[in-house]
Amino acid sequence: MEEPYEAFLQEYLGGEFRVFNAQLPCEPITLSKLLLEQHPGIVCKDGSRYLIKKKELEYLASLLTADEQSLFFLPVLIEIVPGQDEMAVISRGRIEEKVISEILGMPVVSRKARIKIYRPQLALIRKVLRTATQYIFSPRSIGESTSL
Amino acid sequence: MAKQLLKLRPTKIELIRLRRRLRLAERIQKIIKDRLSILVMEFLQVARETVEAKKKSLADFGEAYKALSVASGYHGTIALEKELVATEREIGIIAGLRNIAGVRIPSLELTGEEETLPAYSIADTSAWVDRSQEQFNQCLKSIVELAEKQSNLEIMGREINRTKRIVNALEYTIIPSLKNTISFLEMKFEERDREEKSRLKRVKVLLEQR
């Protein structure tokens, strides 16, 4: 057990974060733009194309007005911090709050650009928006500012 | 069970290294455990959806074959075959990959679902044929959905097994052996200190006797 073992562990840790976050979008796209695409999808950081189901886009469109659709960015990112029970939906404004509260059936408030949710709520959100949401693993604690 | 110890030189620098390694291993364990819990949650959800999709698919096929047999009885098998000979069409499926907590799973979507005119003569056939065509279109959708869900289920199951093995290795082998070695080294250094103290006392006594 020499120094390379530590380097391996460090590399493994970095690798885990890289693998988890490989599907993050290069550039988020608005709902209104995605609705116009024949095969809606986004380009990920690893170069692959991530497809979003039309059914989910139509559901989101039914919740939002035309103006809101052009301000609502997809995919919705769910931040997970290792060792914490709560997660956070990264929110850019009131529109995310509106969508999440509609799905959960309860009012939610965003603080520091994050809407805190718990595991049962996460399951509910993922059930409705399976392809329109993505996980992001963050080494920071929830509430700290992260530049995406 | 015998305590697992790592083979290394009992030096302070090794102890510092081991402590650093333990912190890192515990951090990795936390991350992987979180990943595992998310994968299990997703797996259970996909399993539920797969069961639903399978039930739906079976029901759709049942209905479709029922409609086809009624149409076949109404028109006669040979006449129906003659009508349906030109109805073959290509179907398109958009296949992509999705990444859930580091697991790449396929995503399938049927294209060309928009209503097209039937390739058989509407005038010469009854509504039973239209109905069976509608039912088989529905079957196509449900079978693509089932294929997607089932492959997702298999891939996620395999990944859960792999992740569980890593978590178990960390929890029951790597971290305990690191902890045991750290405590062994700490005891060894304490013992050395005690030996050193008693040696000094003995030397002091000897010096005083001279």
Image (cartoon, coloured by chain):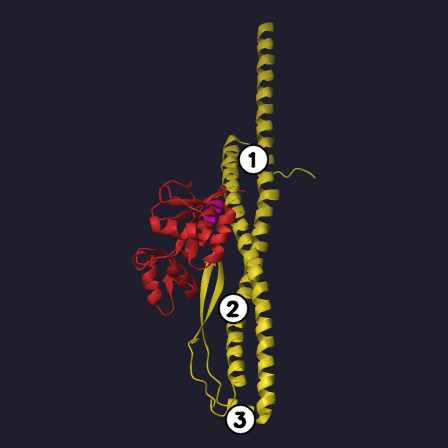
Chain colours: A red, B yellow
Same chain check for tags 2 and 1? yes
Q: Are marks 2 and 1 in contact (CB under 8 Å)?
A: no
The residue where tag 3 is placed is: B82
What kind of residue is marked 1? Arg
User: Magenta region: which residues?
Assistant: A8-12
Q: Are marks 3 and 2 in contact (CB under 8 Å)?
A: no
Give the percent coordinates (x, y) of residue B206.
60, 10
Give the percent coordinates (x, y) of residue A78.
43, 50
Classify 10 Å Cα crowding around label 3: few (below 14), some (14-19), many (20 and above): few
Q: Is residue B110 left or right of residue B155?
A: left
Question: Could you say which is closer to the camera, residue B16 or residue B201?
Answer: B16
Q: Main secondary structure of the magenta part?
A: helix
What kind of residue is marked 2? Glu
- Picture quadrant where residue A42 is located: bottom left
Give the percent coordinates (x, y) of residue B50.
57, 63
The residue where tag 1 is placed is: B9
Give the percent coordinates (x, y) of residue A113.
35, 44
- Picture quadrant where residue B93 is located: bottom left
Q: Residue at x 29, y 57 (%)?
A: A67
Q: Label 2 vs label 1: CA separation?
A: 59 Å
Q: Quadrant of the C terminus of chain B?
A: top right
Question: Could you say which is closer to the camera, residue B140 or residue B184?
Answer: B140
Q: Earlier in the sequence, mark 1 or mark 3?
A: 1
Q: Chain of mark 1?
A: B
Q: SS of the residue at dot 2?
A: helix
B12 versus B162 height, above or below? above
B178 versus B51 height, above or below? above
Q: Are marks 1 and 3 in contact (CB under 8 Å)?
A: no
Q: Is residue A11 magenta?
A: yes
Classify 10 Å Cα crowding around label 1: few (below 14), some (14-19), many (20 and above): few
What kind of residue is marked 3? Lys
Q: Earlier in the sequence, mark 3 or mark 2?
A: 3
